Image (cartoon, helix red, strand yellow):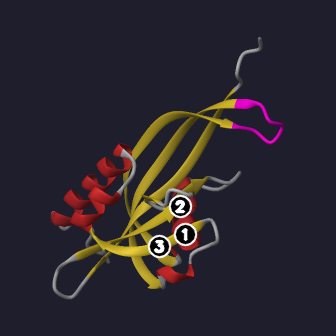
Amino acid sequence: MSAIPTKTQTSAGGVVFRRLGDGRVKVALISVGEGKRWQLPKGLVDAGESAESAAVREAREEAGVETELVAPLDKIEYWYYATNRGGGRVRFHKFVHFYLLRYLSGDVRDHDTEVNEARWVEIDEARAMLAFAGERKVLELAREMLAAGRDARRE
């Protein structure tokens, strides 16, 4: 019996937010997979790409919106198993860098095909929708940062 190979993966994504005129904050969530699991937009960092650039790119691809980086939020780490293209099992050690991303333009309906749906959700409702505890923690960090006004543009 052979050992299961282990590979490291690095991804990046973010909490994409927009402030409404009445002071409410909405965040972009995406639904993926057959179970229509809700999560934050994120994806693999390409070779030669920074985590920050990947987070902005993934927000554009998966949530259909243009954003700008405000601040780093957290780096989460987890392990999972998957089947590789050759049919063998692989164990992945994954690191995901999350950033606070300010919405600039675009429409959540313009997401890519790997996403079932993207939508704007009030930040307090979003926490209950997220499938993963690590992402709920990241969202809470974003909520605290936004509540403290640490997202103000610096000129």
On the image, numbered disc 3 is attached to which residue?
Answer: 118
Mark 1 or mark 2: whose residue is earlier in sequence: 2
> Mark 3 belongs to which amino acid?
Ala
**Is 34 rendered above or below residue 61?**
above
**The stretch drawn in magenta includes residue 128:** no
Which amino acid, mark 2? Val
Give x and y (percent) for residue 120: 36, 76
Q: Is residue 44 above or below residue 106?
A: above
Give me the C-alpha separation between circle 1 and circle 2: 5 Å
139 displayed left or right of 62 = left
Q: Residue at x 30, y 75 (%)?
A: 153
**What is the secondary structure assignment of the residue under circle 1?**
strand
Q: Is residue 143 left or right of residue 39?
A: left
Discs 1, 2 touching: Cβ within 8 Å: yes
Residue 37 versus residue 67 in the image, above or below:
above
Q: Secondary structure at mark 2?
A: strand
Q: Which mark is residue 32?
A: 2
Residue 85 shown in magenta: yes
In this image, 114 relative to 88: left or right?
A: left
Element under disc 3: strand
Residue at numbered disc 1: 116
Residue at position x 49%, y 78% from top?
65
The x, y position of residue 145, in whole percent, is 23, 60
Considering every residue shown, the one lying at the far bottom of the view is: 21
Task: Magenta stretch: give its range.
Answer: 83-89
Question: Which percent across, then down, holds residue 21?
Answer: 21, 88
> Is label 3 in contact with label 2 (beta carbons under 8 Å)?
no
